[in-house]
Amino acid sequence: MKKLQTQGVHHITLMGADRQTSIDFWEGVLGMPFVFEQPNLDVPEQNHLYFDPGDGRLITVFTNENNEPDPTPNPEGIGNLHHIAFSVSRATYTQVAKRLDERGIPHSGEKDRGFMDSIYFRDPLGQLYELASYKFEPPAGVTHTEVLLEAHKIRVAQNAYNITDEHLADAIEHLTEWTTESLSEDRSPKHPY
């Protein structure tokens, strides 16, 4: 038996209300370009809107002009979606709370997650979203997830509760040593002063 190996998220589709509410939220609040539109090919009375979240992948929304926005928080039971997190730059992250406040959108305030900082808020339909900013940049040729895997191993070896800046820094150092060659025979830490 073989796995069905995935290679990334192709798209996420959400049930929306009317067309304009979706455009105003996805493009007007989150800055995702509205790139494509066609009928929902399975449900002709619905429209299918496509937005680019910034990585060339897609967020899509089914809309129907008869649907009214309902801000009631979506259920968080077993099998339900809890939240979707989107990556933002550090420069954008430092502006998120202020820009949500300017729109009167309630939010969680800044949360330190050890390896990233984040802010949570709900859309006009009650779905919870997170805007997250990594606290680190991975070495060239290494992904964020590879750094997190290495930091996790370091954290577990130290019996630490969660990943901290120290674990991330050590993971980046290890990954740099493994992925980047050096002419030096001894790459251990030195004190030249």
Image (tube, grey):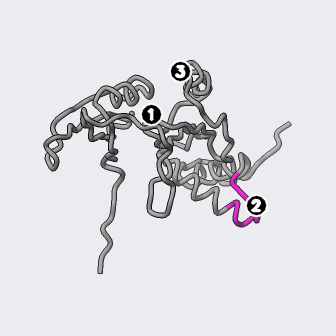
Amino acid type, label 3 = Arg
| Image quarter hosting the N terminus | bottom left
| Residue density around tag 2, few if under 14, some if 14–19, many if 20 or more, within 10 Å | few
Q: List the single residue furthest toward the bottom.
A: 1
Q: Circle 2 — which element? A: loop
Check the image and report above or below for 30 versus 79: above
Amino acid type, label 1 = Pro
Q: Which residues are magenta?
A: 154-163
Residue at mark 3: 103
Image point 56% across, 55% down: which residue?
178
* Inter-mark Cα distance, 1 to 2: 39 Å
Is residue 158 within the magenta segment?
yes
Q: Is residue 68 left or right of residue 35?
A: right
Q: Main secondary structure of the magenta part?
A: loop
Coordinates of residue 151 in the picture (x, y in percent): 64, 56
State which quadrant residue 100 falls in: top right
Query: Comparing marks 2 and 3, which lies closer to the viewer?
Result: 3
Q: Circle 1 — which element? A: loop
* Inter-mark Cα distance, 2 to 3: 39 Å
Query: Comparing marks 1 and 2, which lies closer to the viewer?
Result: 1
Q: Is residue 29 left or right of residue 118?
A: left
Image point 34% across, 31% down: which residue?
22
The circle on residue 124 is 1
Q: List the single residue furthest toward the right.
A: 193
Q: Is residue 187 visible?
A: no
Coordinates of residue 177 in the picture (x, y in percent): 60, 52
**Of the image marks 1 and 2, the number of the one nearer the N terminus:** 1
The circle on residue 160 is 2
Check the image and report above or below for 119 versus 31: below
Q: Circle 3 — which element? A: loop
Near-viewer residue (41 or 70): 70
